[in-house]
Image (tube, rainbow, N blue to C red):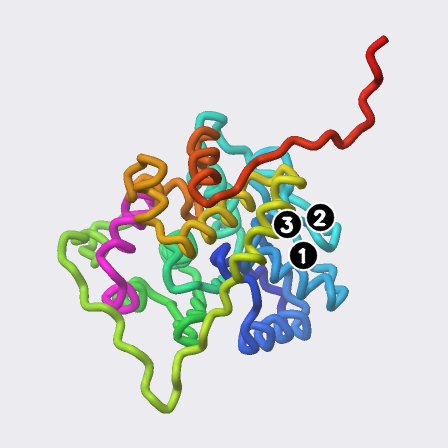
Amino acid sequence: MSENTIFIGGSRHVWRLPAEIQHRLDNVINSGHRVIVGDANGADKAVQKYFHDASYDKVTVFCSGGSFRNNLGHWQTRKVDAPKNLKGFQFYAAKDREMAREADFGLMIWDGKSPGTVLNVLRLVRAGKIAVLFSVLEKRAFNIKTKTDLDSFLSGCSGDLLQDLRERATPEEWQSDNQPSLLDAPSVEPETRSEPKAEQPPATVTEPSEGELAALLNAALAAADPVAVVDALGGLAKIHGMSNVAKETGLARESLYRALGSEGNPEFATVLKVLSSLGLRLNATATLTLPAHR
């Protein structure tokens, strides 16, 4: 069997790998395929941990810019240049585009909401490659081989998700040919995907509790990891109610959703307002012993 390059990625709110994903990763290991994966928290980090625990060395970790957030196995790395003026999602998308170009196949682990994960499927299909999108909520794998398969999948997605895809994709990603597509008509509200049959109930995604998120926030602040800080803040805000947090901070709810979303990059003033609304306080602690003044 020839060696293939598998781009594995997913949503940053997926903290644990479903059994079917673990089985697929075992197949990758047994087949000796090369794996390329990002450096983000969530699915990227969970996939890294799985291969690290399996002592699998055919892994390359990609990052946008000059620093890696996660490389659990100390594998070989690839830094992808991103324009310095880019922020948030567009900055981190640089590595995703490069991985989609380099991969032969893709395996995406989806939380049912993240547009970034679906956008990676779009990139792969546009490049003529096969992608498997595993929905954690539905406990179901979608095999997307062609543009028709992609349109069929998108027909069950919300109008909001389609709009997010259109806003985040480049013109080339959005429409690589002149054929009409569901992506070209976001104003038409598609039907929401039907629930799985009763005999196959959807899996429940275990979300971190408020205490766990607070601990993650502390750890992220201590590690100076801005992405993890935003993830934890977003989770806490959802528990408290995004509308309540928006009201208390004086920020628009839509802006708050974007700032604390999976690819958000909020201003420091916004972070402070959200912390205050959640009843949290930011303290500075010296990590080195400061010299005494004489």
Callout 3 secondary element? strand
- Pick whichever, 31 or 266, lies toward us: 266
Q: Which residue is mark 3?
A: 61
Q: Is disc 3 surrounded by few (<14), some (14 to 19) or many (20+) residues within 10 Å?
A: many
The quadrant in which the C terminus is found is top right
The residue at which mark 1 appears reads as 59
* Res 124 seen here: no
Displayed quadrant of residue 89: top left
Residue extending farthest left: 188
Q: Indicate left or right for 64 with 262 as reference.
A: right
Residue under pointer 2: 76
Question: Which residue is drawn at the image coordinates 60% and 51% (left, top)?
Answer: 216
Q: Main secondary structure of the magenta part?
A: helix
- Left or right: residue 26 versus residue 265 is right
Q: Earlier in the sequence, mark 1 or mark 2?
A: 1
User: CA–CA distance between discs 2 and 3?
Assistant: 7 Å
Q: Are marks 2 and 3 in contact (CB under 8 Å)?
A: yes
Mark 1, secondary structure of its residue: strand
Secondary element at image label 2: strand
Residue 130: give x, y in percent of width and height.
Answer: 43, 65
Residue 96, position as x, y percentages in the image: 49, 48
Is the Cβ of the residue at disc 1 closer than 8 Å to that at disc 3? yes
Q: Amino acid at mark 3?
A: Val
Residue farthest to the bottom, as pictured: 199
Residue at mark 1 to residue at mark 3: CA–CA distance: 7 Å
- Amino acid beneath label 1: Val
Residue 165 lies within the magenta run: yes
Mark with earlier residue (2, 3) = 3
